[in-house]
Amino acid sequence: SLARSLNRLMDSSDDQKLLALVDVRGFDPEEVTVTVKDGKVKVSAEHKEEQTTPEGRDYSYRMIVKEINLPQGVSEDEVTHSL
């Protein structure tokens, strides 16, 4: 579950701090982008899908964007992420 994964992440290292969790379920890893710039962490994910049905074409599109300000004193070089 998400709670167990979070607990494992929090327990993995005492010197690392968790800034945010972003729910990207339903997106493939290659559809998720994480950038660190100008004191912000930006997580974006985009999924496009097209299916042909007897009635025609069916399109599905989902996108999320989340921006998090880095806390005071945290260098952009210190930021890591994992999926």
Image (cartoon, helix red, strand yellow):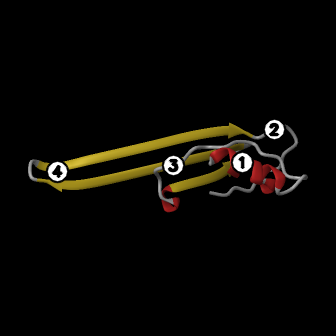
**Residue 16: x, y in percent?**
85, 52
Q: Residue at x 88, y 42 (%)?
A: 73
Q: Earlier in the sequence, mark 3 or mark 1?
A: 1
According to the image, label 4 marks what residue?
57
According to the image, label 1 marks what residue?
6
Q: Which circle, 4 or 2, is nearer the viewer?
A: 4
Secondary structure beneath dot 3 equals: loop
Q: Earlier in the sequence, mark 4 or mark 1?
A: 1
Q: Is residue 43 left or right of residue 36?
A: left
Q: How many marks?
A: 4
Q: Is residue 52 left or right of residue 59?
A: left
Q: Residue at x 21, y 48 (%)?
A: 58
The amino acid marked with disc number 3 is: Arg
- Crowd tier of the residue under label 1, counting other residues whose Cα lies within 10 Å: few below 14, some 14–19, many 20 or above: few
**Residue 36: x, y in percent?**
68, 50
Query: Alpha-carbon distance for marks 2 and 1?
Result: 20 Å
